[in-house]
């Protein structure tokens, strides 16, 4: 199938060609006709499947074919006709950019609003009138309460990454937003999983929806050259620096468990003239954007991230992923390494495992159903992993660094009251990045490293896991 077969307008086809898209992805093939038809859609798809264009293209087409008469304009400006709600600033920005790219010949206006930056430019953009608004829930409600946003004219409402929204605790915000929308509207809900809570949310929001479901993008796990080094925690950054000397490491994404850990890695790399930046929840939006731009343009070879900051990021050409710390949840590992080997390219994933993390490694190997190649000596018997002890050690390390003046200044210092030692990213739900990872459904309640093997590996529900260390209860 070609995009021409989807009855899309020539202006959209032109923009699609400029994006160098040749054929629609499966979610686009399935969802575009349904959305063009005007019905509600429940889409089970995750980032990387092309789902943004799957809703953006038909929305742009419908809005531009059903142009509003001038009389409908509010105070002489265009009313907001489409609202897209996204869980994070990064995702909101990416969706906005997609609407702008696909809609560049439609004459429709898109803007975004999210927190962490001044509201003034956002308010200014709203005051000029927009057709499509992409928003995160907090700032949207804030601007609604200040009467800068009126949702009564919404024709299409998109809730993107609904499962993540719920995990991030946005359920009440979503309900408030939905209550402000007109009853007569088209609603599109996208989620990586269709767990009961998502179905429940959908049933209260969607009217007779059509379900479109696509498998997650082809598994990257098998295409990635994965290895593990047994390294104790104090030696990890040194080993990372050694490995970064390899000229094959073109563009590296380094994952740490804590925000503090991410900043520390950046400091150490900078000391040895390796250009790096960190991206995590304590960074301002401008800071995060600058780090991302620097990494994407190649100005910085290394981006250090915590799990939540890396979620939903669409970064091409990551040659290497380094797991400086192993994640508490094995699904996070799959998600992390899936940042490399995108679009059919090769990728390398190197993990460091300290003796306290050995059970985390076992859990990962069970989940991906393979043993990760060990580089260097294999230490003797593993100590049982105690996640609370790891957390205590993370905090102790930070205190020790603080006491020795080692921690230096962070790029975005916060008062100590808000930046607790060893603060963890709150990564809630973790969609799977692969449909070839067997046994990812259901965790054996006996504890880590005992994932139940499940034949239902492609079930979207199988991918739901929490990466929040406090919730793992292990
Ligand atoms: P998404 O799942 O919407 O985040 O899209 C993931 C990536 O796929 C983005 O970089 C899009 O630009 C790209 N993309 C979307 N649709 C297509 C297509 N039909 N052909 C090639 N790339 C696409």
Image: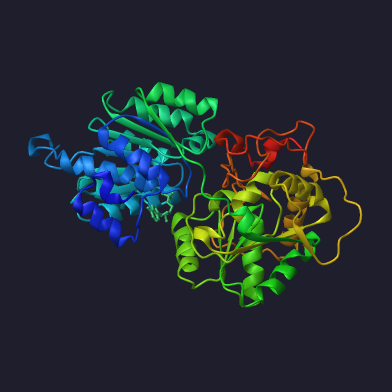
In this view, the residue in front, 233 or 40, is 40
In the shown orientation, is residue 457 left or right of residue 191? Answer: right
Q: What residue occupies the far front of the structure in this picture?
A: 1
Q: Where residue 272 appears, x then y in whole percent?
A: 65, 77
Taking the image as shown, residue 276 lies to the left or right of residue 187, namely: right
Residue at horizontal 26 percent and vertical 50 percent from the top: 4
The answer to whether residue 114 is seen in the rendering is: no
The image quarter containing residue 81 is top left
Q: Residue at x 67, y 70 (%)?
A: 268
Please state, as top left, top right, bottom left or bottom right, where the C terminus lies in the image: top right
User: Along the line of sight, which residue is nearer the eye, 273 or 190?
Assistant: 190
Q: Position of residue 373 (x, y in %)?
A: 76, 60
Q: Residue 287: x and y, percent?
A: 48, 60
Instruction: Please tell me which residue lies in front, 2 or 382.
Output: 2
Residue farthest to the right? Answer: 380
Instruction: Tell me the quarter of the picture where residue 429 sits.
Output: top right
Residue 7 vertical position relative to residue 319 in the rendered view, above or below: above
- Residue found 86% across the figure and 45% down from its top: 384
Residue 144 versus residue 250: which sits nearer the camera?
Answer: 250
């Amino acid at each position: 199938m070609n995009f021409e077969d989807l009855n899309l307008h020539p202006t959209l086809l032109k923009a699609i060609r400029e994006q160098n898209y040749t054929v629609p992805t499966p979610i686009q093939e399935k969802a575009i006709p349904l959305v063009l038809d005007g019905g509600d859609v429940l889409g089970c798809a995750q980032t990387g499947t092309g789902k943004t264009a799957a809703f953006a293209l038909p929305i742009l087409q419908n809005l531009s074919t059903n142009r509003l008469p001038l009389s409908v304009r509010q105070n002489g400006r265009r009313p907001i006709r489409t609202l897209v709600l996204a869980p994070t600033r990064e995702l909101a920005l990416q969706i906005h950019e997609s609407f702008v790219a696909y809609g560049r010949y439609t004459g429709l206006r898109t803007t975004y609003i999210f927190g962490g930056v001044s509201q003034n430019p956002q308010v200014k953009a709203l005051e000029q009138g927009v057709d499509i608004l992409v928003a995160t829930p907090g700032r949207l409600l804030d601007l609604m309460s200040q009467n800068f946003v009126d949702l009564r004219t919404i024709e299409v409402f998109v809730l993107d990454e609904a499962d993540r929204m719920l995990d991030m605790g946005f359920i009440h915000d979503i309900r408030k937003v939905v209550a402000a929308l007109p009853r007569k509207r088209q609603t599109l809900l996208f989620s990586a999983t269709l767990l009961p809570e998502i179905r429940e949310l959908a049933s209260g929001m969607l009217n007779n929806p059509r379900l479109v479901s696509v498998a997650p993008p082809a598994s990257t796990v098998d295409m990635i050259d994965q290895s593990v080094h047994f390294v104790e925690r104090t030696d990890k950054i040194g080993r990372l620096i050694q490995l970064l000397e390899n000229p094959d490491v073109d563009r590296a994404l380094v994952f740490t468990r804590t925000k503090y850990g991410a900043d520390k890695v950046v400091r150490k790399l900078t000391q040895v003239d390796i250009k790096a930046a960190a991206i995590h929840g304590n960074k301002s939006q401008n800071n995060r954007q600058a780090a991302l731009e620097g990494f994407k343009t190649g100005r910085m070879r290394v981006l250090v991230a915590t799990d939540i900051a890396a979620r939903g990021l669409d970064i091409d050409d990551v040659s290497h992923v380094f797991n400086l710390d192993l994640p508490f949840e094995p699904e996070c590992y799959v998600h992390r390494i899936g940042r490399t080997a995108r679009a059919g390219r090769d990728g390398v994933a190197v993990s460091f495992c300290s003796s306290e993390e050995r059970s985390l490694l076992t859990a990962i190997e069970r989940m991906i159903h393979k043993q990760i190649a060990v580089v260097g000596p294999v230490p003797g018997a593993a100590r049982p992993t105690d996640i609370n002890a790891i957390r205590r050690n993370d905090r102790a390390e930070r205190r020790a660094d603080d006491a020795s003046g080692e921690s230096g200044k962070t790029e975005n210092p916060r008062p100590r009251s808000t930046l607790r030692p060893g603060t963890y990213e709150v990564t809630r739900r973790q969609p799977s990045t692969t449909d070839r990872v067997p046994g990812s459904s259901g965790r054996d309640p006996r504890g880590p490293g005992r994932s139940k093997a499940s034949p239902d590996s492609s079930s979207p529900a199988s991918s739901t896991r929490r990466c929040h260390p406090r919730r793992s209860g292990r």
